[in-house]
Amino acid sequence: MLVEALIDWNIDRTVSTIMVDNCTTNDAMINHLLQKLPTKDMPLDGKVLHMRCCAHILNLIVKDGLDIIGRSIERIRDSVIYWTALPSRVEKFEEIACQVPVNCTKKLCLDCKTRWNSTYLMLETAIIYKDVFPRLNVREKNYKSLPTEEDWVNAIEICGKLKLFHQITEMFSGTLYPTSNFYFQKICDIKVKLDEWVKSPNTLIQDMALSMWMKYDKYWEVCHMMGVAVVLDPRYKMSLVEFFFRKIYHESSRFKIDEKMARDILAIPISTVASESAFSSSGKLINPHRNRLHHITVEALMCSRRWLWNEANDICSISDGIQTCPSILDEKDDQDDRDSK
């Protein structure tokens, strides 16, 4: 039905990419479309027709990371569930929060385990009320899930990491501005951060980052054609590409082989103008004020000057019966040296 719609709208020969979620059904659908549509009219013969939703891939990356760290935030989640379960508990929580005091009006929010952004928002708010929970533990005997100090340390660090993904997801999901020019920059931001987190002294963050890194490489190890969009952004052009490639690959050059090819190929001139001008004497003999002289007149003047100059300065020499005289170019250089003095 999609093929029929594209043909009816007469856009089957102008389709460049199709944006879909990442699932096996859509993979099969794209393969089917490639058999039905004229791939010769598509960029790269249809190799980039399938554009996977970046927000969906981000969701998969973060979910893999949260599966590793789920237990470390379990007590925080249970605390939020307990203190939001009944209106009376919400009232008591707000009362103690005013006593601490906490300069915040946000309310605790429950998360959905299948939606990582809700987990981020839950942690972001719970961390603000970190000092409220111990006081509640003293006054409420049924409250049994007080987070430990280690739980809060992990939560603060995890929340800081999830903030990056939350901001990028919101940017990718925009509808009032172009988003293709953000693609390369943001997936490189994630790559750089994952490389840093893998080296974290916190083993929990290391494990989380490694899990995310494996999922990242599965989908974004090779940059999609949409990466070209950043070059078309007049704010960045090639500067952002060069910046991130140096950070990711930790080398002075991005492309070692291309660099050697460029050195060899770009050194080849396509004309002899440069080499001929290096040995040309026309500029010394015919200046802008004498460029209308006939060639016979120029020859006569050159010879006359040479003879007269040699005769006046008596600089011709005879060796083995052969008379030699300096060339007109040598004479002009000598004259220039005298004029400069």
Image (cartoon, rainbow, N blue to C red):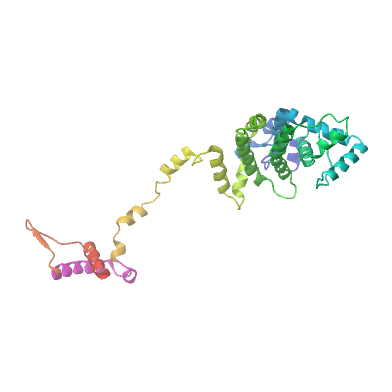
Rendered location of residue 265, percent (x, y): 42, 43
Q: Quadrant of the N terminus?
A: top right
Rendered location of residue 34, percent (x, y): 67, 33
Q: Main secondary structure of the magenta part?
A: helix
Q: How many labels does the image show?
A: 0
Q: Does the magenta stretch include residue 291?
A: yes
Residue furthest front in the image: 138
Q: Is residue 170 left or right of residue 331?
A: right
Residue placed at 27% from the left, 69% from the top?
340
Q: Does the magenta stretch include residue 287?
A: yes
Residue placed at 27% from the left, 66% from the top?
295
Q: In this view, does 44 lie to the left or right of 133?
A: left
Question: Quarter-wise, where is residue 321 in the image?
Answer: bottom left
Instruction: Specify the segment rendered in magenta.
Output: 286-312
Q: Quadrant of the C terminus?
A: bottom left
Q: Which of 301 and 280 is in front in this view?
A: 280
Rendered location of residue 316, percent (x, y): 12, 63
Q: Which of 114 and 270 is in front in this view?
A: 114
* Vertical arrangement, residue 208 with respect to residue 276, above or below: above
Rendered location of residue 284, percent (x, y): 29, 64
* Residue 181 shows in this picture: yes
Residue placed at 87% from the left, 35% from the top?
139
Question: Quarter-wise, where is residue 209 in the image?
Answer: top right
Residue furthest left in the image: 321
* Residue 29 shows in this picture: no
Question: Quarter-wise, where is residue 125 in the image?
Answer: top right
